[in-house]
Amino acid sequence: MRFQIAISTDTYTENSEYQHMLEDLLKRLNISTPAVGYWTDISYSVNRTNDVHGLAMCRGDLELPQGCSPCIQHAISEIGKLCPYMKNAAVFYDHCYLHYGNESFIGEFVGEEETWISINNITKVNREKFYKVREKLFSELFVEATNGTSSPKFFAIGEDSVSSDLSVFGLLQCIPDLSTGQCKKCLNYHVKDLPEYAGFSAGFLSIGYSCFLRYENKLFYNKPSLPPPLPPPSSPPPLPSPPPLPSPPPEISDDNEGNKLPTWKIIIIVASLVMGLTLILSLIGFRIWRKKKDKIDERGLLNEDKKLVRNVEYLSMKFEDLDIATNHFSQENKIGRGGFGFVYKGILDDQEIAVKRLIDKDSLQGPDQLEKEVNLLAGLQHKNLVSLYGYCIERGEMLLVYEYMPNGSLEKHLFDPAPSMGVLNWNSRLNIIDGILKGIQYLHEDSRLKIFHCDLKPENILLDSNMTPKISDFGISKFFDVNQTRECTTINIVGTSGYMAPEYRFFGNFSTKSDMYSLGVMLIEILTGKRWSRHINSCEKANNLKSNLVAYWKNVSFADKLDKNISEIYSTNQETILSDILHIAMLCIEYDPESRPKISEVRDFIKISNKTSNGSDGSNNIKSNTANPTISATIENCN
């Protein structure tokens, strides 16, 4: 089965920049998608007029990568033939879906376009019963796909019987980048149209850009594999012959009564035994407690460091006050979405505040995130960290209250500036970089706890009224005693893929060097104005971002690497600083964590760079493990 869609009439020409960008994008999708079942990517053109956005997704029941790879390869090889020279196209096969275009659609719901395919009509059964069984099945699948428990995300399969010789097999799937609300809305478009467009068809397929529905009267998907049955218990061995009965004890005559122990001696003996046993158990318990004492718990906090966490009851706020402050959490007051929740602007005691309302209350992440941010931020004070004003746990709500940052996130200023914002000039960008570095140095080296942020990205850098940057969103941070922990491992890998260090993303290993990788990606994006975080490491041994940068910048002048949207001409001193920042950013995104600099080294290097007019270039302060700090231009392959 195949269905192709030429989404628009816009075309590109042979050997054009768009064609080259598209070819590069499809190669990356071909490499990355089979391993995880879903992948998005962007190829950026030089002047941003020919950017290509793409996604590839395999059906959720396929075994990865072998069940996914053939379909993705075939779709990539065929889409150019099916939709020749089209700038926007999509192709849907039985096992996979491929979509690319010159406008961003990733993470967005497009519900206007649907395509339906019906297969034969049911004629030999009770049609009314067939209709009801199908309706019941898709109602159940809708809940399963959108209740947050499905694996993969937004996917459900199931079956129900109409009669002894007829069953309905159904499937629902959304693109994983959608929000739960978007997925529900998309699937609802398809499910509600079943009576009108599917009728009493034995099979039906409804395709959209963001989700799809399918059912047939025969099994078309792979059922989840069940664990092998337990082996039957072995026959018990024959019971041994009962031992001979002991001889009856001799009768005790009245003459032996004088040999009995007095009652008080018996009491002393029993009490001594109980006390001895209690002492032994206490010693065993103490040994176990000492072993567990220094272990890291699942939230990344040392048990012995819990005594360092302050009592934060004084920060508790009433829900009623916050409800009034945000105009009952109205849409007009909603200013964004932070980690695990929506953010609302409010006025409390004549002061502007930002209230984060956690929406993932049914999972462990919600309460853990609130507890961690409150405990952590209550004890941290730095001008480049967002200030926590309070929290609220009441009426089933979990709320965090921060200082309001009127200039929003750095991400908005870099990639989606409103006309009123204007483009950040070089002086503003350098000041923002300086503030980010100071905030990270405080977290890594100057606070009483060593703190790994684990989600550093432009979206989590907020700007106050003076454009001072402040690091936010500490909900997935890890923090430890500054003298005790250097590197740790977690199985709960949470963050933003494009900014994750390879050792954290693939193995769960995190340290201060993981944050340095994220910092390197951010610095490159601040200087270039491009989302290089889209070029993420798609396999364990590859450093795709560095390879892409080196290949992309081959024979490109320094000036052409920088953001073209800035009209001002930078000074000679600024050029030196910018060049050094770009150099050190490339060191920060080294694959090997030990090759990345520490934050103090980065700050020292940039301070020395500010004195380049006096003849010091600071080139000996940061060392790279490579002979040439610009790195080889060889593209690394995943093997």
Image (tube, rainbow, N blue to C red):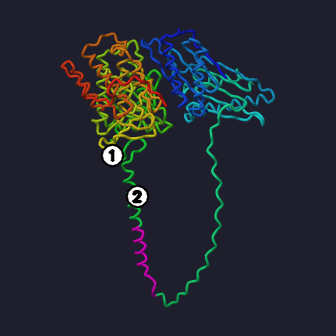
Q: What stretch is highlighted in magenta?
A: 258-276
Around disc 1, counting alpha carbons within 10 Å, would you say few (fewer than 14), some (14 to 19), or many (20 or more)?
A: few
- Does residue 109 appear to the left or right of 400 in the view shown? right
Q: Residue at x 44, y 13 (%)?
A: 48
- Three-letter amino acid code of the residue under disc 2: Gly
For residue 285, which numbered disc appears in the image?
2
Asked whether residue 75 is in view, the answer is yes
Which element is circle 2 on?
helix
Examine the residues drawn in magenta and state their main secondary structure.
helix
What residue occupies the far bottom of the structure in this picture? 255
Residue 236, horizontal then vertical, whole percent: 64, 62
What residue occupies the far right of the structure in this picture? 124
Q: Report which residue position mark 1 lands on.
A: 307
Residue 141, horizontal then vertical, whole percent: 63, 32
- Does residue 342 appear to the left or right of 437 in the view shown? right
Q: In which quarter of the image is residue 622?
A: top left
Q: In this orientation, which residue lies closer to the viewer: 551 or 535?
A: 551
Of labels 1 and 2, the one closer to you: 2
Q: Residue at x 40, y 60 (%)?
A: 284
Asked whether residue 408 is in view, the answer is no
Q: In this orientation, which residue lies closer to the viewer: 551 or 235?
A: 551
Q: Residue at x 43, y 43 (%)?
A: 298
Compare marks 1 and 2 and give the one earlier in the sequence: 2
Report the Cα–Cα distance between label 1 and label 2.
21 Å
